[in-house]
């Protein structure tokens, strides 16, 4: 019997589990995919919003401002990248009123340092802005992070503190039992728990329905992105939004913490919760709207494109409720990433208020070794490590300079990667400009070796996403 | 810090030829640094034949061609380190590298030759809409799986792009029992060699669909099919021509990009068209004592030309180390192009000797003249029945022509 089962290992579930892991509780995280961070958390704008966006008094506003305040410490403890680069919401002259409203809302929401900047200062701040832009909101506390890096680190830290993770466990049935719930997977495996946390993202409505709550509604809204080579990471230093419309924050142009440049997202309401196809119309719209904000975009430097799905709730606000041992976290659309640490804190409070009895563990350790620590070492320090473990001297991914030692770590450290994309999200191998062209055969070999599985059973992201179909004639 | 006369980055055919040439010109203190398990570069995975027709007057496979150079390197006892990645080159010629036995280390070089080769253009650069399943590879990655690891990355294959690697993989996968359904090429002509189209596609009945592209990828976990369409003369897909092809694999062979991160980081000027360094006829970059040759400089279709170019760089580096090269002269002659000629290598001439200029054209042209002008004056006019982007062209600028130049610019054009 577990004390807490968390359904869904996105950023929300991950931070909830990590926050609760400080207590003497038996915690289990269930995730339907072959890795953590495979839902909305995998493909979003990666912005820690300052908190000027959401309507005053809403949960979104409250949790966003609090989450953004907590994020720096959380990322420091978990050893993940965080860069407070500041956000700009730019406007043409005709949109000035809207921006002024936003500034006022930011002040009301308690966002520190938020102010209006005029044309001259604006163009000095960002020389690549479209010349016609007139003014902007500047929020110095806006920041960028890597959402899957944060999620992997949070799950890893929770596991280091005793939490368990079951991947490929799709919750398909939940039954009320005497002391809590019996949670069953589509493959028929059942686990029991006292408390259940529903952080299933787009499927939080389905999970809620399994617990007897038919009122939760979530629908997908698609967003297409394009990612540019690291050569372009200096194109702008702030995250540049355009004045928002009711469909969202429009197309942004932002550096990423890894030094690439991100363009997107579009906003299209769709029906299919699995439909992450990118579209030609999406690309065209990203490009044309990005061009409203900036000039001379180096579009020939696109290295990849992707699409993410927002889990839009029916109430317009985050839906957070506790009922009879179930906590539902639904409609966690943007700024869900920014709010995640605060959502976790909120859940902690709901549980302790509900009388959950647990002591803080004596050996609880909030610190995780940075995933990319090797890169940051001096030449002497690196040589110390290479002397002990020569695999750190063997370069596998040449675009991002990732060694065999780092890849083996991704395959052995909590939560372990089991496929190529998992290795990629943990190490960045294959994320550079050749997109795995050179290193993927070696990565396949290392996965096969470390996990003790046949070469041809290695997948890109679990399931049927195999890379090879068996031996060639000569090798049979 | 250890110092070495000549450090060569990359042990492919370019690096090896340059090493041999420098050694034979009297420089013995050389170190080749190669990232891979052994010398040979991209040739190690090119097990088809067709290498060395010009250089050795026989048809060798890639590994055989590489082996000829490897022997020459070993006969001369030229030191090399494999599984050693060069991480940085500084302006004052300090090379930082790393491997498992030496760890991270630095070497001060008198001269450096850049021979890092090139890599294939990945899917992202093409922005194909649709899903992102397993089963999309560059042709070179597939080549590595098949030829080096002995595994089949696909059974039903569509190839986008008709570059040489793609053509060769069409044949290779077919011989391994896969069904190659089509090769789609965006342009109205192929970027590959005519002989590869004959031997790799026509001989196996694989259709080459010119002016076609892939507009959408289907399949959730593994590729299940692609939608292709014909494109108009501005290369936009024509919606009415869309057709679905069932397949489990999409191979991309859409061109190669010289691998110039180190070059850029060192502050060396890069030619916008070749994506390689700007060099003079000695293959010297704008940092004195740093040379470049092979695919890192511009993409070659024949390895024979790579060796030729690397000889030049190796000899010039040797002269530089011995102090025989005057410091790079302020550019004496700039080579310019009309756009129909896309680029030239070298991009400038600083000496007085004969120079062979290599170049590529932007489109297929028939019954034309390749013209070189000094101001208004035509100094070379060479008739050709056909030129194509897939085939590298050369012209020779003789020392007499250089001696009698009036301006400091030569313009290359197609007329
Ligand atoms: C286009 C876009 C841009 C965004 N930009 C930002 C931004 O810049 N800043 C910001 O703060 N927020 C942003 N967001 C919002 C942010 O991405 C989300 O709020 C956050 O990722 C939600 O995390 P989550 O854990 O709730 O959901 P998810 O990451 O979707 O996680 C849910 C998990 O539950 C699993 N699951 C589902 N059903 C089951 C089941 N039956 N059994 C087991 N597991 C199950 C899923 O596989 C998934 O891993 C953006 C979102 C999108 C889509
Ligand atoms: C797949 C393919 C098919 C071809 N088919 C034919 C053909 O049929 N006939 C023909 O004549 N020619 C063919 N060619 C062309 C010819 O083989 C190549 O042009 C030639 O191999 C290029 O040689 P290179 O030394 O410049 O590059 P490469 O062979 O790529 O060698 C570069 C070397 O540098 C190393 N390196 C790169 N960066 C670093 C670093 N930072 N530190 C250390 N080492 C580094 C690489 O590992 C590599 O070994 C083909 C080319 C390709 C790509």
Image: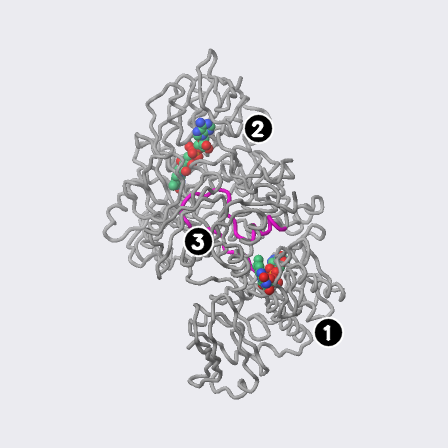
What color scheme is it? Answer: one colour
Where the N terminus of chain B falls, by quadrant?
bottom right
Tell me, for residue B126, which label it has, or none. Answer: 3
Outermost residue to the bottom: B404
Within 8 Å: ligand 2 and the Cβ of disc 1? no
Where's residue A333, x and y in %? 37, 35
Tell me, for residue A322, which label it has, or none. Answer: none
The secondary element bearing badge 2 is classed as loop
Left or right: residue B254 versus residue A139 is right
What residue does disc 2 label?
A161
- The answer to whether A436 is drawn above or below residue A72 in the figure is below
Residue B250 visible in the current orientation: yes
Q: Which residues are magenta?
A: B118-147
Quarter of the image for residue A307 reads top left
Where the C terminus of chain B falls, by quadrant?
bottom left
Question: What is the tally of numbered marks visible in this picture?
Answer: 3
Residue A469 is one of the magenta-drawn residues: no
Distance in Å between CA atoms under marks 3 and 2: 44 Å
Distance in Å between CA atoms under marks 3 and 1: 47 Å
Within 8 Å: ligand 1 and the Cβ of disc 2? no
């Amino acid at each position: 019997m577990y004390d807490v089962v968390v359904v869904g290992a996105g950023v929300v579930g991950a931070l909830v589990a990590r926050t609760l892991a400080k207590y003497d509780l038996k915690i289990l995280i269930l995730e339907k995919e072959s890795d953590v961070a495979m839902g909305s958390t995998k493909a979003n704008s990666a912005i820690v919003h300052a908190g000027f966006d959401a309507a005053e008094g809403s949960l979104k506003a409250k949790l966003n401002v609090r989450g953004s305040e907590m994020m720096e410490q959380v990322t420091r403890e978990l050893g993940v990248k965080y860069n407070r680069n500041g956000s700009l919401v730019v406007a043409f002259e005709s949109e000035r009123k809207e921006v002024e409203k936003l500034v006022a809302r930011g002040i009301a929401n308690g966002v520190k340092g938020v102010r209006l900047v005029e044309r001259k200062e604006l163009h000095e701040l960002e020389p690549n802005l479209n010349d016609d832009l007139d003014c902007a909101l500047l929020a110095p506390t806006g920041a960028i992070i890597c959402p899957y890096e944060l999620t992997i680190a949070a799950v890893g830290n929770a596991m280091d503190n005793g939490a368990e993770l079951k991947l490929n466990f799709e919750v398909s049935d939940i039954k009320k039992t005497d002391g809590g719930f019996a949670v069953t997977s589509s493959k028929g495996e059942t686990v029991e728990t006292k408390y259940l946390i529903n952080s299933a993202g787009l499927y939080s409505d389905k999970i809620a329905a399994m617990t007897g709550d038919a009122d939760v509604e979530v629908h997908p809204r698609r967003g297409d992105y394009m990612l540019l080579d690291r050569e372009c990471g200096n194109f702008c230093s702030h995250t540049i939004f355009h004045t928002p419309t009711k469909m969202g924050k429009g197309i942004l142009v932002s550096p990423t913490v890894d030094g690439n440049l991100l363009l997107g997202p579009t906003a299209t309401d769709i029906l299919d919760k699995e439909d992450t196809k990118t579209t030609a119309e999406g690309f065209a719209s990203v490009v044309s709207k990005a061009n409203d904000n900036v000039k001379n975009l180096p579009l020939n430097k696109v290295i990849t494109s992707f699409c993410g799905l927002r889990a839009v709730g029916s109430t317009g606000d985050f839906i957070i409720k506790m009922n009879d041992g179930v906590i539902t976290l639904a409609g966690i659309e943007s700024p869900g990433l920014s709010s995640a640490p605060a959502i976790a804190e909120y859940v902690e409070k709901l549980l302790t208020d509900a009388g959950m009895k647990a002591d803080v563990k004596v050996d609880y350790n909030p610190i995780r070794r940075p995933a990319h620590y090797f890169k940051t070492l001096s030449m002497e320090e690196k040589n110390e490590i290479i002397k002990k473990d020569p695999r750190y001297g063997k370069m596998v991914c040449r675009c991002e300079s990732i060694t065999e030692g780092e890849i083996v770590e991704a395959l052995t450290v909590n939560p372990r990667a089991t496929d190529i994309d998992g290795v990629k999200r943990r190490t960045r191998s294959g994320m550079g400009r050749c997109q795995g062209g050179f290193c993927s055969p070696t990565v396949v070999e290392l996965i096969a070796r470390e996990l003790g599985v046949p070469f041809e059973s290695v997948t890109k992201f679990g399931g049927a996403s195999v890379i090879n179909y068996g031996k060639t004639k000569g090798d049979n | 810090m250890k110092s070495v006369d000549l450090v060569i980055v990359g042990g492919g055919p370019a690096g090896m030829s340059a090493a041999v040439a420098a050694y034979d010109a009297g420089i013995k203190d050389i170190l080749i640094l190669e990232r891979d398990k052994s010398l040979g570069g991209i040739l190690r995975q090119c097990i088809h034949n067709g290498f060395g027709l010009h250089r050795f007057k026989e048809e060798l496979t890639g590994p055989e061609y590489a082996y000829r150079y490897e022997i020459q390197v070993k006969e001369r006892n030229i030191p090399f380190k494999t599984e050693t990645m060069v991480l940085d080159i500084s302006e004052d010629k300090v090379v930082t590298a790393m491997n498992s036995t030496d760890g991270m280390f630095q070497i001060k070089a008198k001269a450096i030759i850049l021979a890092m080769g090139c890599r294939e253009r990945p899917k992202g650069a093409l922005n194909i809409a649709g899903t992102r399943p397993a089963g999309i590879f560059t042709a070179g990655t597939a080549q590595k799986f098949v030829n080096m690891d002995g595994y089949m990355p696909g059974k039903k294959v569509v190839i986008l792009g008709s570059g040489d690697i793609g053509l060769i993989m069409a044949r290779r996968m077919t011989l391994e029992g896969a069904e190659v359904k089509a090769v789609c090429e965006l342009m109205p002509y192929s970027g590959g060699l005519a002989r590869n189209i004959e031997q790799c596609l026509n001989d196996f009945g694989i259709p080459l669909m010119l002016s076609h592209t892939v507009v959408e990828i289907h399949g959730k976990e593994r590729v299940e099919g692609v939608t292709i369409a014909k494109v108009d003369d501005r290369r936009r897909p024509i919606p009415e021509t869309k057709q679905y092809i069932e397949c489990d694999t999409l191979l991309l062979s859409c061109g190669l990009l010289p691998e110039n991160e180190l070059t850029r980081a060192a502050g060396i000027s890069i030619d916008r068209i070749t994506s390689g360094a700007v060099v003079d006829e000695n293959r010297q970059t704008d940092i004195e004592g740093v040379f470049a040759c092979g695919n890192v400089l511009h993409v070659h279709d024949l390895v024979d030309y790579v060796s030729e170019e690397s000889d030049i760089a190796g000899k010039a580096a040797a002269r530089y180390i011995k102090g025989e090269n005057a410091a790079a002269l302020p550019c004496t002659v700039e080579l310019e192009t009309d756009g129909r000629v896309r680029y030239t290598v070298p991009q400038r001439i600083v000496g007085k000797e004969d120079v062979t200029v290599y170049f590529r054209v932007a489109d297929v042209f028939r019954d034309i003249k390749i013209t070189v002008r000094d101001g208004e004056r035509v100094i070379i006019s060479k008739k050709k029945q056909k030129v194509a982007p897939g085939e590298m062209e050369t012209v020779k600028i003789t020392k007499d022509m250089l001696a009698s130049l009036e301006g400091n610019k030569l313009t290359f054009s197609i007329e």
